[in-house]
Amino acid sequence: MIDIICSVILLAGCFFIFLAALGMLRMPDIFTRMSASTKASSFGITLIFFSLIIYFEDFSLTLQLLITIVLIYLLSPVAA
């Protein structure tokens, strides 16, 4: 059951990253491209990391992934 839940969350994360890539190609100007790349890819990476947290159930890995999620949300606007 956990495998199915992790797979669904992982596929949702991959879908949002695909939408971010598609937004980079289809948006007309630089500001909407930056918005599409930062928002959708950050959410997609967060979903992928949450699926890893659920699947592995390891405290040290959970802590590392949560710190990485916080850093992604803090630094992705700067990187864009």
Image (cartoon, rainbow, N blue to C red):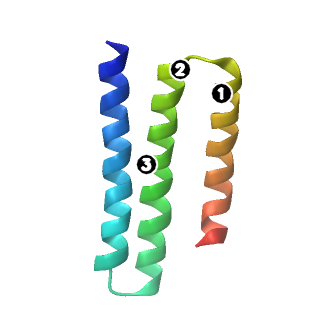
> At label 3, which amino acid type do we have?
Gly
Counting residues from the start of the chain, the first of labels 2 and 1 encountered is 2
Vertical order, 76 against 6 (above or below): below
- Mark-to-mark CA distance, 2 and 1: 8 Å
- Mark-to-mark CA distance, 1 and 3: 19 Å
**Mark 3 closeness class: few <14, some 14–19, many ≥20 residues within 10 Å:** many
Q: Nearer the viewer, mark 1 or mark 3?
A: 1
75 with respect to 29 (left or right): right
Q: Position of residue 52 (x, y in %)?
A: 50, 30
Counting residues from the start of the chain, the first of labels 3 and 2 encountered is 3
Residue that badge 1 annotates: 61
How many marks the image carries: the answer is 3
Q: Position of residue 5 (x, y in %)?
A: 33, 22
Residue that badge 2 annotates: 56
Residue that badge 3 annotates: 44
Disc 2 vs disc 1: Cβ atoms closer than 8 Å?
yes
Task: Give the residue displayed 39% in from the left and 87% down from the top.
Answer: 29
